[in-house]
Every structure is written in C-alpha cells, then in structure tokens.
Image (spheres, rainbow, N blue to C red):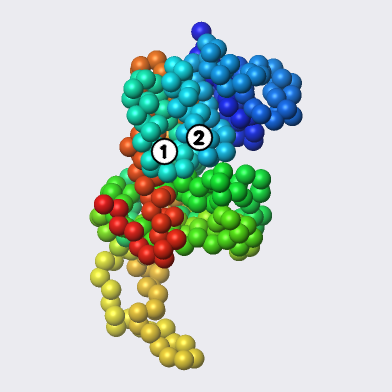
Amino acid sequence: MKHTAAIICYGNMGSWHAEQINKLIDDLEVVGIYDIAPERCELAKENGLKVFESAEELYQSDVELVIVATPNNFHKKYSIEAMEAGKHVVCEKPACMNCEELEEIYRVSEKTGKLYTVHQNRRFDVDYAIMREIINRDMLGKLYFLDSRLYSNRGSSGRWRSTYEAGGGTLYDWGIHMIDQVLCLIDSEPEYVYAQLQSVRFPLVDDVCRVNIQFKNGVRAQVIADLWCYIEEPRWHLSGDDGTATIYKWWGKEGKVVKANIKEVDWEQGCVYTPNGLSKTMWPRPKQEISELPLPELDHEPRWEEYYENVVAVMEGKAEPIVTHEQIMRAMRVLMAAFESARNNQTVHLS
C-alpha cells in the first residue's frame, strides 16, 4: 500500500512535486492539493487530484505527508500546522524566513515526533556530485578556495519572488541551494561570512548575490548567483595546492582537472615578457610539469528520486533523513549572516 501525500500550493514547484512523485516514486502518491488560486485548483482536478477546500480539511484527511510549496513567508505556518495535525512535512527551500522561525518548527517536530525536512533537490545535480567526488578522492591536495557560480540573463520571474514580504530575492531562492551544497562539500564549520547583495531591476529584493564563506579549516568559498549576466564563468572552480578542477555548466559533466607533476618550482626556467614589463611569477609552468585529466566518473549517478525514497523510509522508521535538522539550521545561519553582512557592509562572525 502506498503512502499518501498532499501539496499546499499547487504552483510551479507544487505541481512539479506532484508530477514527479506520481511518476517516479513507487511507495508514495500525491492524492490532493490545497491552493487559493481557482485556476490552479482547476488544473489539479484536470490532473486527477482531489482539491481540498481549506488547509484544515487537508489536515483532517488521512493524508500522511504534507508538502509545503507556498511562498517563503508561509513555510513556518503550514509546516507547524501540518505537524500539529499529525502529518509529516516536506517543505520547499528555504525552510522559512530566519533562524528563530526554524527553531519554532523544530520544537513542534520534536513535540509531535513528526518528520520535518527541506527539499534540497540540488544535492542531486550531477555537477555537484562530480565536485564532491573530486574532493572525496583528494585529487587536488590541500584545498583553499571553492567558487560556486550560477548566471542567468533573464532576471527574476517577478510575482512573489520579487516581493520583500514574501521572502523573494536571489539569496533566498538560489543562494540557499548553493550555500547548502558548499556546506556539504567542505568538511569544516563555517566561521565568517561576507556578502554583497544588489538590486539591479527589483528595488525591494536582491537579484544578484555574492556570498563569501570562510571555514575553520582555512578553506574559503564564494557563492555567486547573478540574474543579469550575459557572459558566464564556469559553474565550479576548485583550487588546491596540487591542482585545480573546473566544471563548465550547471547540471553538466564537462570540465577538467589540471594537476602538478612536480611539486617544486624552478624559478630560473624563464619569464613571461609583456610590452610593459616581465614576470617570473606569471610565467606558466612548462607543459611537462602538469597533467590535464578528465573529470572523475561517478560510481553512482545521482537520482532525484532518492530524496523521496528516503522520506518514505524515514516515515516507516527505517532510515534517518538525508537532509537533517542540523544541516538545515547551519545553512540558515549562513543565510542570515549573509543578509546581515550585506545590510551593514561588514564581515559577520558565526559564533
């Protein structure tokens, strides 16, 4: 017998959850939705889903799992209500608006014993999985800098994502995904955060975010999400003292690893000459001293279905969540530090 789920807010992401779960997850079925928009309710009916007249009616049903896909400022409300009604909860990212709200949610999860987790689906992107493999294999020596970058030239989609009160903006939208990935990649606690947020076309929210994170082990990471950029840089760029790795595109497998064959540098080999001077520092190593390697093959191709397979296993008491409370809070703390840093133009220390 399948477990049952219902979705609060049948918008772009809500309808995507329903379609993908019912197509790909054997032991879980989305049977209904609640939405305040009549056109979305009609679409749900056309897709064979029950439309609940209110959130309360949904809570009173025998549905086991509630998927919260509302605008960000409603995440706390519906997550808490659903758990108090005896339902497990999967919430879209970000978990909520701030750390205080998240602590409230955790208290209810602990009190009710119900699963609460966040849909960090970008942990299943193939580019992220390859970067994780490079780090796990220790291919680059001692790591010191990680660049994670995403670019678009389409701007924001508008609507609630351009509204401050609803939790709109690029940092809440894409920044939280990228921060979560970086925190999972670097095996150390974040210590300092410095961020710059820009409002290029939408004055109330950021549509460009740059977040710098320094970890306690000395590694620094930079997260960039820019919605108005017409020339992209590589999706990933990872530097270690023995080599560099890059992946060119989001959700792609193209890139390379360049490593040093010889550790010591011979400073007498030569110089690079320019019209305005010479430099030994910027003279490239001879080709025989470096190796260019392909990106590593993955033993396990990432599957988005693993997320909901894990949710079902947790509901059955057979597994622990793969997106944990600790991970969600750590990412939220960095997110809030980024907002504070950008507001005050200061580095924020995570105590």
Query: Mark 2 — residue?
Result: 75
Q: Are marks 1 and 2 in contact (CB under 8 Å)?
A: yes
- In the foreground, 108 or 264: 108
Q: Is 85 in front, or is 90?
A: 85
The image position of residue 200, as x and y in percent, is 61, 62
User: Dividing the picture into quarters, in which one does residue 277 lie?
Assistant: bottom left
Q: Which mark is residue 101?
A: 1
- The residue at the point 47 percent across, 34 percent down is 76
For badge 1, the amino acid type reads Glu
- Viewer-closest of 37 and 209: 37
**Residue 242 visible from this viewpoint:** no
Which callout, 1 or 2, points at the residue further toward the start of the chain?
2
- Residue 252 point in image, percent of width and height: 54, 47
Residue 315: image location, x then y, percent: 41, 18
Q: Tag on residue 184?
A: none
Q: Residues within 10 Å of mark 1 (few under 14, many from 20)?
A: some
Q: CA distance from mark 1 to mark 2?
A: 9 Å
Residue shown at the point (28%, 66%) measured from the top left? 262
